[in-house]
Image (cartoon, helix red, strand yellow):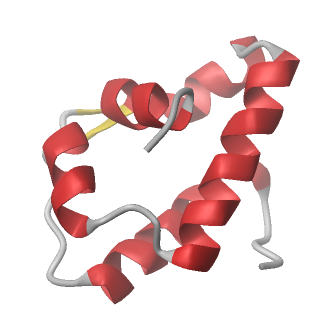
Amino acid sequence: MQQPLKRSLSTYCDVNAMELVNEIPRINPAELALFKQQLANAINTGSISVAEYETLTGDEFENESELTQWLIELWEILFGCWRG
């Protein structure tokens, strides 16, 4: 997983500190565009493993499908309707 997606998930999506939604307005526009691209790619390709996400955030998922559903929900919280 590459930056800024890795840093953002680790910092703001930790199971104890889901604050990314509050940070979106303050993120540099170029970094935000890259974050959106990386998140969309992760949703579309499954490029983030359950183990990798759990290590970064402390959140737990049963399988890749459940993680993908959460990433779609995260997208919708942050940016509105997922149109993948």
Can residue 36 be seen here? The reply is: yes
Would you place residue 81 above or below residue 55 in this image? below
Question: What quarter of the picture does the C terminus occupy?
Answer: bottom right
Residue 16 locus on image (x, y percent):
19, 34
Viewer-proximal residue, 21 or 63? 63
Residue 50 locus on image (x, y percent):
23, 67
Question: What quarter of the picture does the N terminus occupy?
Answer: top left
| Residue under the image location 14 percent in, 82 percent down | 62
Left or right: 47 in relation to 18:
right
| Residue under the image location 23 percent in, 53 percent down | 52
Residue 39 falls in image quadrant:
bottom right
Residue 72 falls in image quadrant:
bottom right
Would you place residue 47 above or below residue 77 in this image? below
Would you place residue 50 above or below residue 35 in this image? below
| Residue under the image location 16 percent in, 60 percent down | 51
Left or right: 12 in relation to 33:
left
